[in-house]
Every structure is written in structure tokens, then in C-alpha cells.
Amino acid sequence: MTAIFKDHEADRRIRTKWWASRIAIYAALLTWAAICLFPIFWTITTSFKLAPDVMKGNLVPWWDFTPKWKGWESLGLSPRLIGEVSTVREEFLKRFWNSTIVALSASALAVVLGSLAAYGLSRFNYRFGFMRNSDISFFFLSQMILPPVVLALPFLVLYKSLGLLDSRIGLILLYTLMVLPIVIWIMRDQFQGIPIELEEAALVDGLGIWGAFIQIVLPIALPGMVAAFILSLVLCWNEYFFAALLTATDAKTLPVMVASQTGSQGINWWSMAALSSAAILPLVIVAIFLEKYIIKGMAAGAVK
Amino acid sequence: MNTEGDLLHTVTADNISESRKKLGKLMVWGTALLCGALALWQMAHETGRLANGFETWRPVLYAYMLWATALCVAQVMVNGEKGKRTLFVLPAALFVISLVVFPLIFALYISFTDWNLASAAGPQPNGWDNVVEMWNDGFYWNALKNMVYYVLGVSVEYVIAFGLALLLNAQIRARKFFRVVFLLPLMLSPVAVSWMIGKSMLEVRFGPISRLIRELGMEPSFFGTPEIARFMIMAMDAWTFIPFMMIMLLAGLQALPREVIEASKVDGATGWQSFKEVIFPLMLPVSVTAIVIRIIFKLKLADIIINVTSGGPGGATDSVTSFIFREYRDRSNVGYGTLLAIVYLVLIIIFVTLLLKLVSRWMERPA
């Protein structure tokens, strides 16, 4: 059969080239997607494995092994044990709760303090001694390079004398300090994007500067604040270093619990896998549903 | 961006009576006195000169907070409208100063003592002994050397992240899906990652990667030799942090002016040419920001090392932070550890300042 309309040789070459580039792009995307997803897939499936499955290296659930609740039972979180009293579950939930409270409060505190400071710095002229606006901004942002080790020991001693060791408040203060520069960085960018005329109009209409800030600027900057909040949440939830040094029993957070189990478990991977899955799941869910804000937060300041 | 200058200009007639000003100042000085007096009293109690005192320093903390609040309120009372403006920055500034500057001064003091938490005696100043010890401590210099490798690893991460950003910026389907998937590693805590990858997937007997390598006919050993162990740590850290750079670069790509790229196409540039001559130069500022921030994060690298190798084999994977962490936790050698931390801080400050200077000079240079 001969086609009536025939593509010219050059056109066909372009089309094959186009297909080749398509295939290359999708191959690269899928490869990296596999690299990103496999460890998560591995952890979640391993939490449903038994010892023989682990040793045989079975990978695909239902196909080469039957999922069992053993791993989750060791956390007291399986359908069979969920109704019963379980000390392991209580322990786990306590750590989970600690992490939640600490991360949420620290992020909230950082967003409040950071937004105020960022707004002030983007709108008014300050002079504290020799420090002017750019110096103050630099002072805040320079906290980012402060390595946690430098503060760890002074805080250990300080908290000991203040009776704040192994308390959630202590961790909250420290985490707020840790994420504050990032919040200020994001929020300064947000406020600089809001036209000053809005506030000028509000001032003419009789609002004070705080009134204009709360009633006019805040609602506009809210998406940016959510972005900063979520980014801080991620950092605080995952923080390990300070939590490992400053907490012992009461205020221990989830990462510390995961880390303390890592060495002792040997080859019964199912319980470690269940614990790891439970520790990463909240943020995986956050990532899936609030991805827009996380990307917005990280993109702020990158593009000027 | 310009942050100087009175952007939002307000003019208000403040009529602040003398008594209001006086009351404001009285509040600040009163609470400061209270705080100081409590601190002195507590110190006298701790050193045994006074019998009755508080169990902890917490009342001093409360007094300090009272003083901070009074200072904020007094701003408005004394300075009126100008004080209201100061009130935006003051809380954050007070917070950072009290939580960073005081501990830093204290750290500086500890670092010149022989304090060991295990010994009953408190800190005793020991002059330059710690510095001498540091000078002869091969492990610390080794950790610093490792940090150089780790920081250099950022360049590879940058290349991968840029590639991924370009892929995500191409005309593709299911862009949102890929974006979420690529973002996921960043959400995972380094501690969980160290178990998920370092302790189970890379486990020599049963880990899936070891199996794969054995299938290929090689003997898996991930943390045996220094080079491979260091590479593994770098790979794990890169895995979690590549999304971070990727997103910054993606934001930069999306903000590029479309016309310029189209113009280069019209002029007949191939894909590679338009990347090399147009996209990459336009992306330089974003790239520099992303790399600098990534380096700053990299300098704090510790969690994965602490949990996977604890510095082994023979300190080959130690970062400075993980080394000092073990100095604290295993040897309780806080005086010496703190000196190492302070030295590290100084080195970081010098390094980052030089980096920023270099970058700004290089960016100003006409291309």
C-alpha cells in the first residue's frame, strides 16, 4: 500500500527525534521516581513481613509474600491489638504526641515572631545603635549558619539550671530559634511583594500601623505564612540532634525513639520498619496534600 | 533588594505626657532590678552563702521574661508611634539575642575549662590546654577534612538537581505527580532514612541492594572501606536534600522570561546551545543562592552519620558535628568538645563570609 500523503524525509527525522527525546525524558523521570519511592515502598512493605520473607528478600506483597501484621503488633497498632491495653503503643503515642506538640508550637511561635520582624524590616527604618535595617536582617539570617553543636552544651547547662531539661518547652524554644531565620527569610520576601499603597490607603482611612498590618496585610500574606509554617514543621518534626542531647524520658521525640531502637533490633526488621513508617507517614501525607505550600516556601527568596 | 529607607512613612503627632514616659522607664528599670536581684540571690544561694533560695533558676527566667515584656510595653509608652514600629522587630530580636548571644558567651567560657561531666568537680579553667589538645587531635582534623569532601559533594548534587528541575520544567504529563514524588525524600527525617536505607537496604546479608550487587557477581560491602563508606553517607544525604535544590532551581526556571528562550530558538540554537548560552547564565543567581544555602545545611550534617556509621570506619565518615556529638555523649568531655565546636563556628563564619564575598564579586563582574 502506498500512502498518498508522504512526509518529507526531513519531517520524519524530526518526528523520530521528538519521540526519542520524549522517551528519554520519561525514562529519566521514571528512574528518579523509582529512586525516590523505592526506600519508602521498601520500608512500608517490610513492616508487613515475617523473618523468612526478610531473609528470602521477597519484595512484592501478595505476590511473593503474604502481608502480616507482626511489625505493627510490636507497636501495638494492629487490628488485633488495637482494642487492648498496650504499653508499647502508649510509649509510641507519647513520643508521637511530643513530636506533634513540639513541632506545631515551635513552628507557630516562629511564624508569629518571624512575620512581625520581617514585616517591620520590610516597611520601616530602624536604627539600634550602629545597626540599620540591612544589618538587622543580616543578624537574623546569619543565625542560619550557626551549627547546632555550638549551642548544644550551653543549652544543656542552661536548661539544667532552669529545670527545663527533658521538657517540651525547652525543645520548643530551641526549635523556634532554629527555624526563625528561615521564616524571616520567606516572610520578608512575601511582604516585599505586597504593595505599600495598600497600607497607605488603610492609614489614610484611619487605621494604625498595627491595625493595617493585622487587617490588611496579614490576610494577603497568609499563603506565605502557611508555607513558612509547613516548612518549619518539617524541620522541627525531623530534628534529632538537640532532642537526642536534651531529652531523656518525658520529652523524647519520635526521631530519638527511632534512633534508640535502630541498634537494638538486630534482624527483626518488621518492627523497625513499622516504627519508621509511622514516623515518616505524617509528613508524607503533608507532602502529598500541601505540596503547593512547601514548594512556594522554598521557592520564596530563591527568585528575586 | 533595598531594605533601607522609610518605605511606609507615618507622621503622627504624639502627645506623650512626662508622667507616662517616667512610668515606662520605671517599668523597665524596676523589672531589670528585680531580675538582677533574683539572679544575685540565686547565685549566692548556689555558692552556699545564703541558706534559703530557689531550687532552680526558673524564677530568674520568669523575671527575665517579665523584663522583656516590660521593655516591649515601655517602647510604646515612651516612644509612642515610633515605639509601635519598634515593637515589630523587638520580640524576635530579644528572643534571638537571649537564646544565642548568652549561650555563646557561656560556651566560650566552657571551652577554656577542663570540664568533664563524669568528674564531680565543676569546670576548672585550664588555659590553652584544650587548644593544644585540639592541635594534636588527628580525629578532629580528619573530621574537618571530611567536611571538605562533603561540601564538595554539593556540586554533584547541584548537577543532578538541575537536571531534575529541567525535566520537571519540560512539557510533560503528570507533572504534579512527579513533583510530589520528587519532593518526598525531603520530608523524611534523616533518622528514619538512616534506618530505611543505611541499616536495612544496605544491610550486607538481606538488604535489597546487597542482593542486587551479589546478583551482579560482586561482594557487597558498603561501610567497610573509607571511600565507599563516605560515598554512601554522601549519597544518602544527597537523596534527602536534592529535592531542596531542585525546587529552588525549578522556581528559577519558571521565572525565566519565555521570550528570551524563544528568541534563541528562532535564531536557530539547538537545545544544548540554548541551555549553555541562555538558560544557564540566566539561572546563575538562583543557582548560587541554592548552592550557598545547601552548603550551609551541609555544614550541619550529622544525624545520618551518628545513626549509620557513628563515624566509622576509623573516623572516615565523621563530620565535625557527629564527632563532637560522640565527644559529648560517650566521653562527657564537654570542655574540650565545646572548644572544638567554637573553633568550627569560627571556621564556618570565615568560610561562609569568604564564599559570599567571592560570589558577590563574581556576580558583579560583567559576563
Image (cartoon, rainbow, N blue to C red):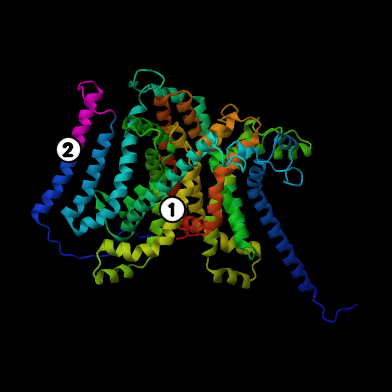
**Residue B115 lies in what quarter of the image?**
top left
Q: Which residues are magenta?
A: B33-55
Task: Indicate the secondary structure of the residue bearing disc 2.
Answer: helix
Q: Position of residue B105 (x, y in %)?
A: 32, 34
Using the image, determine if residue A94 lies above or below residue B264: above
Q: Is residue B287 magenta?
A: no
List x then y, in percent, for residue B321.
48, 34
Query: Callout 2: few (<14), some (14-19), or many (20+) C-alpha neighbours within 10 Å?
Result: some
- Alpha carbon separation for disc pair 2 and 1: 37 Å
Mark 1 burial class by Cα count in 10 Å: few <14, some 14-19, many 20+: many
Image-based side of B280 in relation to A232, left or right: right
Q: Residue B38 in magenta?
A: yes
Q: Looking at the picture, does residue A237 appear above or below residue B173? A: above
Identify the residue position indicated by label 2 in the image. Answer: B33
Query: Please, which residue is most extreme toward the left here?
Result: B18
Q: Residue at x 45, y 32 (%)?
A: A249
B348 vs B292: above or below = above
Residue A74 picture location, percent across and down: 60, 35
- The residue positioned 33% from the left and 55% from the top of the image is A116
Q: Residue at x 41, y 57 (%)?
A: A225
Q: Nearer the viewer, residue A61 or B75?
A: A61
Image-quadrant location for residue A263: top right
Decide if residue B146 is in sight here.
no
Q: Is residue B352 left or right of residue B200?
A: left
> Which numbered dot is residue A229?
1
